[in-house]
Amino acid sequence: MGKGTAKRIGSSLLHFVALTLTALSLTSAGTVHAQGTDNLLRRPSTKLLNSNSATSVVKLRNLIDGDQQTIARLIGREGSVNVVFEMGASAVTAERFKIRLGRVTKQVKVELLLSIAGKDSGYSVIRSDVLSADSKLQVLPFQAAAARWVMIRFTPTQKGQPIEVAEVELWGSPNAPATKYEFAESPAKALDVLTSLKTSKKLAVKLSRDELSLFSDARDGRLDHWSFAEAALISSGVLDSRVRSRYLKKIETLEKTAKQVTMSAGNDFEKAERLLQWMHSKSGPLSKGYRADQTDLSTVLDTGTYNCVSSATLYNILGKRLKLDLRAIEVPDHAFSILYDGQRFADVETTTAHGFNPARDREAQKQFEQQTGFRYIPDRHRAQRREINATGLVAVTYYNHGVTLSKQGNYQAALFEYFRAMSLDPEFNSSVKNALAAMVNWGLELANDGDFEQAVRVIETGLKLAPADASLNHNRKVAYTQWALELADSGRDSQALEVLSRAGKLMKDKHFDLLQATIFIRRGEALVKSGRWEAAWDAVAAGLKAVQPDSQKRILQWQRNYFLRWANAELDSKRFSSAVNILVRGLKDYPNDGDLLNNLAYVIQNGSRHIQAKRGNAAALEFLSSQCERFADIPKIAAVAKNHAKRVYFERRGDGEFKKAIETASEFSKFFEEKEYDDLLADGYSSWAIALTKQNRWQEAIDVLATGLRSLPAHSGLQKNLAYVVQQWSRQSHKANGVAKTNAILQRQVARFQGEERVAEIAIGYARRVVYELLDAKKYSQARDAIQNQPGVLDLKTSERLAGNVYDQWSNSKSREGNWQGAIDIYTEGMSRYPDLKHLQHNAVVTWQKWARTHMDKKQWAKSIDVFNKALVQFPKNGGLQNNLRYCQQQLSKE
């Protein structure tokens, strides 16, 4: 059974063809068969009936006791060992066979056979496998099958060899197999439903009396009143009994010849093989060769051509008349026969003379595959095989008719054939799926051709038969939707709304209520696409009175977005004023709509940028001013103007166009608060000055900051940056040019920026640095002069503090050398330069006393008296000197 993947049902018609549903990329949901979870052999109702093994029944129970350590040792009287179980009063569903062998040394053939007819008859082989000796559990799956009796057959590979089995398990469901038939109506009732569909094609849709009788006879899965040959001829379209009689006579003639050909056969296998070889001989009924689409028995009898289905049908008809137990196997893409002979069985590929038991002959398999294009699926692949009886094989003929008609697009006739097939074999899964596919594809094709009324009629008929089918339900929704939209597109709004209303009630789906709005919105969108915005509004607004409340909400939402979309379209075309006016119209209807307000700001922002780029600052300022005035009550617009000014300012500043940046800030100053404007202006001057310092253009940087300070004299940012530039300039100058030039620079800046404390502090700091560096170098006279060289920089107090430090360190250097007079002379000079500096006078007195102390410690009173007398000449009124002089005089007199 091949599988199709075309848009319609349309795979290659090869033998016995199954097709998958493809409409709208959907697949019909098949009946779900839950995998069985019961070990059927251990159910209380299961009975171990008998075995031909010498092993006792008690020991045989070791097979199913659930204990892997207990072994059943089987010894067959006739080579094979058959163990039979009865599953209870009703059939169960078997799905998997599990076996754990004992520690045997040879391979063992294990066969699983199921029957619903009786404990001694009607068995079908479900699995046949040669298992290697292995104590591990081996799992053998297969298609779910009904069973009342189960036979497990063990055959040693060497005659007489004992067989050890630890455990066997048969897993499945205790219930009968779930049906694969997915329709709510029986096949006969389904045919009545399909007959109610009126189409342009004249079809012979009425079942003949003989067909009805045949279907009734086959209801129990067997043919009691009709022969296999008659059933096959009816399925081939031979409905006239007189014509059938002629074909039956041909079959009788073939039967006679077949009996003669097989008369001397020693057993059923030999008889079956001779029958096949004769049928393919020059005088046989299959002499004219293989044709993939030749599925009818009547055509085989007329022409001698065949495919797998028609050849298997004729082979089984003749074989059964020769008393052969023949059945058929359905596999993917294909069908063939199977022969049973007691405990033996063999597949028969009826399309080739060498097809008997093809598993034994690889050359026969190769010939079959070359001739048909199909692959032989042997018994070990049981999960892909389904055994069918005579009614099932006849059903395949109907099925293949359906496939052919489906390929031709004659879906109604195809459906009749599929349901005829299901009348004979309700579990024919391929027919079930293709019937669903035909209904889906038929409806889809009608919809694609614009015949929506007929399309929904077909789909709804399908849903009467399969109300849960996902594809039919989906396609019905699609068909009604497309129908309504096509009506609307042709201007028939009332009819479109009527279709949607009907669909909504039928399917109880809100989709169709909402879709009412789509009719009008689609029309509006078409006008929008052509740029006819005003007309689009009118077209959509017309739907407000015609549609359901839920659709009214969709229209209102469209209208809400309408102004935004229209404004964006104008914006894309650089028509800014038009975009603004459109948004204003929208705000009249939706005054607090955040999106409209945001977009208004966005349009004005983009407009200002465009005007700035094309026509310059003045034009942009004029545009923004007018918009701010127009929308004075909308804060977002004022923010747009401010942000525009900032953007242009920072762009120019970033490009190094500092003067233009400052001019921009000034031009747009009305959009800023005072402090915000001052900070922006200060940023411009500061950035400009910093950029100049990086080029060592220090004076120009100072001049820029001076200009800024004239406009913003109290701005701390400018003041700090001025101090920073002065400081960096002084550092650079000190390294490059020395103290004198640096002093000159600082003196000029202090004089220029009187009142700027930070500049004065930098100059003072530099002066201190110079003095302390000279002191560290013991260059006392230069340190003294450095203080004197800072007119206008150092005030008197600072100068005196620095001078005191210089003279102290200078005098101390002399004292350490013992040059006391030199130390006194330094202080004397300092006092002459800084007569009001008490610090120098005090330290000078202290130095005189230290000098005198050097003599007093040695009791050199005369020398001490001499030092004090000199000191009193300089400080005649100093009481300390006077007291020390008297003390020395007293000491001298005591001596």
Image (cartoon, grey):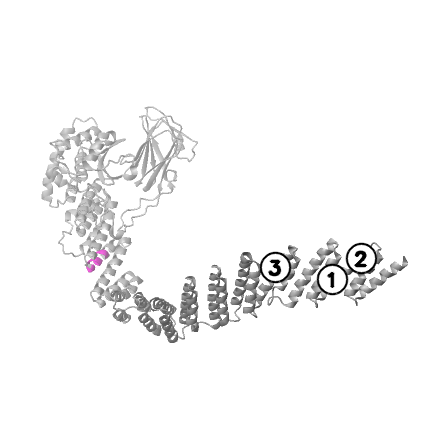
Q: Quadrant of residue 797?
A: bottom right
| Tag 3 near tag 1, CB within 8 Å | no
Secondary structure state at the residue bearing disc 1? helix
Is residue 480 highlighted in magenta? no
| Front residue of 142 and 10 | 10
Total number of numbered discs in the rendering:
3
Is residue 456 highlighted in magenta? yes
Residue carrying label 3: 770
Secondary structure state at the residue bearing disc 3? helix
Q: Earlier in the sequence, mark 3 or mark 1?
A: 3
| Front residue of 159 and 521 | 521
Residue 55 coordinates in the image, percent (x, y): 37, 28
Q: Disc 1 and disc 2: Cα gap in Å?
A: 15 Å
Q: Quadrant of residue 570?
A: bottom left
Residue carrying label 2: 853
530 left or right of 36 in image: left
Q: Disc 3 and disc 1: Cα gap in Å?
A: 24 Å
> If the image is split into quadrants, where does the C terminus sit?
bottom right
234 left or right of 163 in image: left
Q: Residues within 10 Å of mark 2 (few under 14, many from 20)?
A: some
Residue at left offset 84%, top offset 57%:
861
Q: Disc 3 and disc 2: Cα gap in Å?
A: 36 Å
Q: Amino acid at mark 3?
A: Val
Q: Give the magenta-colored segment's residue range.
A: 452-459
Q: Earlier in the sequence, mark 1 or mark 2?
A: 1
Q: Main secondary structure of the magenta part?
A: helix
Residue at left offset 32%, top offset 24%:
158
Residue 843: image tag:
1
Where is 450 relative to 253, above or below?
below
Residue 613 seen in this snapshot: yes
Secondary structure state at the residue bearing disc 2? helix
